[in-house]
Image (cartoon, helix red, strand yellow):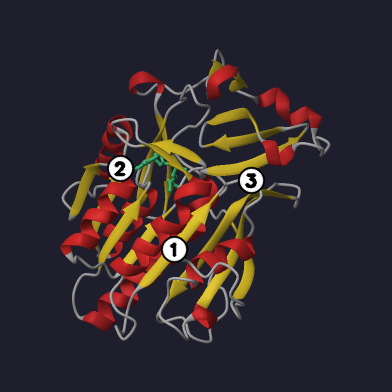
Amino acid sequence: MLCRFRSCAANRGTVRAVFTRDQYELLDFGDGRKLERFGSEVLDRPSPAAAGVSIAAPGVWGTTTARFELEKGGRGQWDNDGLQASGEDGAWSVSHGDTRLLLQLNPSGNVGIFPEQAPNWDWIADRVRSDTETLGRAPKVLNLFAYTGGASLAAAIAGAEVTHVDSSGPTVAWAKRNAGASGAADLPVRWLVEDAMKFVARECRRGNRYDGIIADPPTYGHGPKGKPFKFTQHLDSLIEMCGELLNPGDSPAGFLLFSCHSPGFGERDAIETVSGVLPSGQDAQIEGLSLGLNCSDGRQLYAGVAARWSSQLAGRQNSS
Ligand SMILES: C[S@@+](CC[C@H](N)C(=O)[O-])C[C@H]1O[C@@H](n2cnc3c(N)ncnc32)[C@H](O)[C@@H]1O
């Protein structure tokens, strides 16, 4: 069982999406919606974190090129008459460091990236580079619930051998297109359409080990054959198995990055979740973070939490 309420002396802090302004910008938020510019497109989408807050710059909403309205069943409609994108199937792209990520309006309201993850991608790349030096070989990195591959590509481009696991075939195909767009198609990434829980359980049985593990589980999800993943029900065993898959505590390198966007699950919960599976004495090396988006006017929009552990972070404060 995870020791969820063990006390932690971990670092806590905040990281905000880091993109150059021409690539991504949160322009305004309020009244349950957010207005973001992804490269050439300005998107107006629902945002529960923006409920109960007033819009600060009403004028800027007139620049919207596509607006999403949620309907029943978690899907909705885009009004995209103003979309400028002229790529195949209305796709366009943004860049972050060496990665180029393709964007497309999706019936769930997503577009292919969660910009609040950008500081985590930078952290992963740093960890991979220093672990490569320490180990004298390419670190093995496992990315679970890996979506369109932002984290997988950050790790692979920094020099890792990556196993990318997501249950959605079209999403894994999208991640491979992102690898191509980033000039990283030949890097060592295993692209797997798999149930994350099933995959980690099998890896544990086989005795396989990873130097770094990334997990960003959704509140609800499902495997390729429909097997449900429920955050509240499956999180403990998922993280416990991730702990087992990490190289032993005496390894000179290694990291674990857990993030989530589940309502009511805070920074402290994230720290306690991770600390329960680390080798004893490693708690002080965990960073608990709130993820967020920086608005042009200086306000911040909450976008989830993360806990990051690295065997090489002893005594250091947040790096991003
Ligand atoms: C919140 S997104 C992850 C975002 C990603 N970490 C990023 O920032 O780019 C959740 C992803 O989990 C996948 N997923 C949901 N249930 C799953 C399951 N049981 N096994 C594997 N992947 C699953 C979905 O297909 C989706 O791509």
Question: Are the two marked residues, 3 and 2, in contact with CB atoms closer than 8 angstroms?
Answer: no
Label 1 environment density (alpha carbons within 10 Å; few <14, some 14–19, many ≥20): many
The image quarter in which residue 25 lies: top right
- Which amino acid lies under the numbered mark 3 shown in the image of this protein? Pro
Q: Determine which quarter of the picture holds residue 206.
A: bottom left
According to the image, label 3 marks what residue? Answer: 263
Q: Is ligand 1 less than 8 Å from the beta carbon at label 2?
A: yes
**Quadrant showing the N terminus:** bottom left
Q: Tell me if 227 is positioned left or right of 290 in this view.
A: left
Task: Of the two numbered discs 3 and 1 on the same chain, state the one appearing first in sequence.
Answer: 1
Q: For mark 3, does the 10 Å Cα neighbourhood hold few (<14), some (14 to 19), or many (20 or more) residues?
A: few
Residue placed under numbered mark 2 in the picture: 195
Residue 58: percent from left, percent from top: 80, 29
C-alpha gap between disc 3 and disc 1: 19 Å
Please say if the residues under marks 2 and 1 sit with CB atoms less than 8 Å apart.
Answer: no
The amino acid type of the residue labelled 2 equals Asp
> SS for tag 1?
strand
Q: Which mark is residue 257?
A: 1
Q: Amino acid at mark 1?
A: Leu
Which of pointers 2 and 1 lies earlier in the amino acid sequence? 2
